[in-house]
Image (spheres, rainbow, N blue to C red):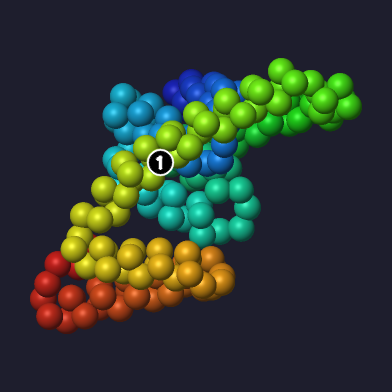
Amino acid sequence: MSKERIKNGLMLFAFFFKIGCFTFGDGWSILAQMEQEFVDKRKLITKEELLDMVAVGKSVPGIMITNISMLFGYYVGGWFGGVCAVLGMTCPAVLILSFVTAFYKVLKSNVWCYAALRGIRCAVVPIMGSAALSLGKEAFRRKSAIPICALALALCVFTDISNVVMIVAGVILALSIRAVKKTRGGQTA
């Protein structure tokens, strides 16, 4: 294994370990940090590539951010990079949950722990919103995406349609639109 591949693997492990330790909430709050680090700062991927990873990571079984860390790690460093990214992402949770489990009875009734969690919740919502807005701009770069997303949002909010059905319908609709545009000689990307 080359030194460059090992260096990339360690960089991936360190980054995902850091955000695994200090990020509260779900995968959306982590995506904002990934965008800052890997799209804006290091320029390893584009926003569109990150959005594609989010789409795939959300579409397959498992924890979204773990799926995305595997995809990103593989993109940057092959299988070794993918494994390093996943280990970096999951190790903090395993360590923290092991600690919390061991001291659960004490922590459960601690007013300071409760207050800290309330503060964390208040901070996580704007972070998630920021990531959704930033990635949403990329998703709406084609005018045809706006009514599709509006319909999907309405169906998610007002019905009990399964996420799997929504994703499959989105894939079928996007492929259909692409096929129609291709036969008309329009833009297909």
In the image, taking residue 62 as reference, residue 189 lies left or right, namely: left
Q: Which amino acid, by three-letter code, is at mark 1?
A: Gly
Image vertical order of residue 48 relative to residue 103, above or below: below
Estimate the x, y position of residue 174 in percent, counting from the top left: 32, 71
The location of residue 96, given as percent across then percent down, is: 73, 25
SS under mark 1: helix
Q: Residue at x 50, y 44 (%)?
A: 68
Residue 139, above or below 72: below
Between 44 and 31, the one lying in front of the other is 31
Q: Nearer the viewer, residue 16 or 32?
A: 32
Q: Which residue is mark 1?
A: 129
Is residue 76 in sight in this rendering?
no
Determine the residue located farthest toward the left in the rendered image. Answer: 185
Q: Is residue 103 left or right of residue 68?
A: right
Q: Is residue 71 left or right of residue 143?
A: right
Dividing the picture into quadrants, the one containing residue 37 is top left
Q: As displayed, is residue 27 above or below residue 171? A: above
Label tally:
1
Q: Quadrant of the C terminus?
A: bottom left
Residue 35, percent from left and from top: 37, 34
> Residue placed at 22% from the left, 67% from the top?
144
- Specify the quadrant of the image occupied by residue 43: top left
Q: Quadrant of the N terminus?
A: top right
Q: Does the rendering let one see residue 119?
A: yes
Which of 171 and 185 lies nearest the eye of the viewer?
Answer: 171
Residue 139 lies left or right of residue 57; in this view the side is left
Task: Decide: few, some or many residues near mark 1? Use Cα within 10 Å; few <14, some 14-19, many ≥20.
Answer: some
Q: Position of residue 112 (x, y in %)?
A: 71, 18
Name the residue located 27 percent from the left edge and 68 percent from the top edge.
Answer: 147
Q: Residue at x 56, y 41 (%)?
A: 26
